[in-house]
Image (tube, helix red, strand yellow):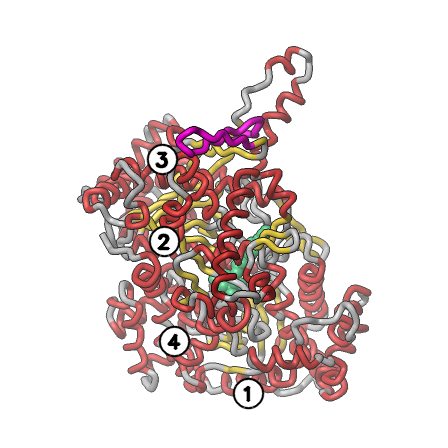
Amino acid sequence: MSNEITKNSIENAVSQKLIRYFGISDFEEASKEEIYMSLILSIKDILNERRSNFNRAVKKKRAKRVYYLCMEFLIGKSLKNNICNLGIEDTVKEILTEKGIKLEDLYEFEPDAALGNGGLGRLGACYMDALSSGNYPATGFSILYEYGLFKQKIVLGEQAELPDEWMTYGGVWLTARTDRAYTVRFGGKVKEFWREDGKCDIVYEDCEEVEAVPYDYTVSGYNTECVNSIRLWKAVSKRDFNMSLVSQGQYVRALEEKGNSEIISKVLYPSDNHTEGKLLRLTQQYFLVSASLQSIIFDHLKVYGSLENFADKVAIHINDTHPALIIPEMMRVLIDNYGYTWEDAWRIVSKTVSYTNHTVMSEALECWSEDIFKIRLPRLYTIVSEINRRLCKNLWASYPGDWEKISRMSIINSGSIRMAQLCVSSSCKINGVSELHTEILKKNLFYDYYKYTPEKFINITNGIAYRRWLCFSNPRLSELLDLVIGNSYRTDASKLTEFKNYENDKSVLLKLADIKYNNKTEFSNWLKSKTGQILDPNTVFDIQVKRMHEYKRQLLNILNIISTYVDLLNTPNMDIVPQTYIFAAKAPPNYYMAKQLIKLIVAIENEINKHPIIKEQLNVVFVENYNVSVAEKLIPCCEISEQISLAGKEASGTGNMKQMINGGVTIGTLDGANVEIKNEVGEDNIYIFGHTAKEAEELWRQGYNSILYYNKCYKLKNAIDFLASGFNDVGFVKIADYLISGGNISDPYMCLADFDSYYKIHHNMLNDYRDTLKWQKKSLNNIAKAGIFSADRSISEYANKVWGLLKV
Ligand code: 26Q
């Protein structure tokens, strides 16, 4: 057991750090930066001690461990989360107040660790939190991107990208483990030497060698001694500094040579739901996989001394196909380094690895050109080919002569290595991230595989670290919950249902309204002080925050806003509910349409600002640099949660869950987890519109004729006409064309097909909003029914159904 944490112990720890690292013996002399760093270092010590105790207990119990491989962890800030998890917020506040320092100011100081793009990365971070909170032995593996996701600035109405140098103040959390570095090899030639005993020695020549140095980021759990970590790999050049070049006066070339391989961990690819077949990305993926596997094997051998029980003691989870190379890499290591036969190695690998799919969109499915793969990873290429040869042989036995099916299921096809096929054919379990998504996987994307091995396919609906998103981000609401239903929901989210008993309690409903108003006011003040943008907390806050992508259909929301704007221009004294639309989103820097959409939203914001009278009724703001921290401020203000993707495209969504648990009422399509949200809250507490996934697919197959919708609906026509000519920007004519033309720039996400039902339901929703008690009852129901979307629940399902993992 760890020592108890007291006011004294924290104060002493911080003072010691001030002396040791900054030579400051007096709190009063320390700058905010120094106190910030010293506080983090002190908390890190507590966590590291607990981690080591927890590890000892895991070893002693010989408990199974899970390793969660993910190219992204969108961690955000950790100071507040760790302080709240440790239950020491009041104590720390007390210490700091005595020194005239506000803890909130220190919180603000911390940069976001933005080692991820969006949903996938944030899910990884939420799951690590739940794993620790649930006392499960787990390690996350990813890359220590020196630059996190770019910082977004709106410059002259458009997104500009700035480098995100998060390490200066965010790196304090990391513990470098230079003693545990591994070598990763790329390229070169592979030579096979067959021995007399029939075994084969593999020798690599002329490979490029890179050192992978681990940096551990500790992850605390709520109210528990369990602490896990995310191990982040940094690429360090192994090539010794080339002194001969230096002596020839080629100093810069010598530096360049050294720096080359360190590029691997420089940047995170800023795309979301889209792959790029770039060599550097493949390099990053193998770097992650190879280093992580060496670390996993090292840990295992230290405890058990053999790999015989590997599959019983280790679960390796791959998130999306990005870390799929762990499959051939594990085969390589078991066969080449530990002398396993193919069959024995395969038994271990296929029992150890599980895979979650996070998207069905074709542009996000990873394929690598055989040529690139062969050159960069020659030994792995041989292994993947052999996996594929054996797979096809088995398939042939099950489906003799069905070449079409076998070529659909084959890993290698027409010069491409298809990572989804590799994952599905090799994993012990495959899951989708919402009920609908899993059904689509079974019926479409992985239909053949589902028929082949149905027992492997399961659903585990996503969940969120609700303590971060509710308890810590929305203290007003969680205080009310503590008061009304007690605080047991803080460890057991299902207890939130007890809040439903108060759906007709007028005083509770009015308190909810009050809390929302205060949150909105707080956010408005923050935004005004940051950017000067003005919000009126007396208007309804309608929020769409997520990555910018065509399939998420921010454009559908925009069309409805423009149509209301046109109405207000024509009828200034129209009776409408005063409404504020808040957007926040980053666009991938090379995604033209996504950037155009940001430009359009900012243009609308500016257009409305020219009409102060209209602005009172209809306000639009684009909040720049959306990240975890902005989300934590914004989501507690949500009244209307826009989840309007084309049905069938959003695998789950998790922002929908975060807004729901903060009392936001969803307007959405029957897509991803919206379907389950609807099932939880019932039709009265959600606004569903648009084509279902099945209908949308059918419509697309029959031929989507956008102009029909344009001609049929005058509101839509007005909006699109305004879009085409109302702004002095040719770019928006292109967006109008994209919406209505059937040509090669047409809208594959069929915004117009859902416009009519969207604007009607939106209108009804705003009418309902006029009645405060009626609205707050809906809001209350959303809070009360959100418990199922807790990451604690998701993780316990993974532990039981996928990993065979027990709490320690
Ligand atoms: C792949 C190759 C090369 C470069 C980038 C990528 C790449 C990077 C990120 C591909 C996809 C992603 C991210 C996908 C993602 O975030 N998917 C979301 O996952 C969430 C968690 O399951 C779901 O809730 C969302 O519905 C899904 O869109």
Q: Could you say which quadrant of the image residue 784 lies in?
A: bottom left
Query: Element at badge 2?
Result: helix
Query: How many numbered tags mark residues here?
Result: 4
Magenta: main secondary structure: strand
Query: In the rendering, which numbered label is found on residue 764?
Result: 1
Q: Position of residue 243 (x, y in %)?
A: 60, 14
Q: Amino acid at mark 1?
A: Asn
Q: Marks 1/2: CA distance?
A: 52 Å
Query: Which circle marks residue 28 in the picture?
Result: 3
Query: Which numbered marker is on residue 584?
Result: none
Residue 61 on image: x %, y %: 19, 46
Residue at the spot x=53%, y=38% of the render?
379
Q: Are marks 4 and 1 in contact (CB under 8 Å)?
A: no
Labels 2 and 4: the sequence-earlier one: 2
Q: Amino acid at mark 4?
A: Leu
Which range is magenta?
Answer: 190-210
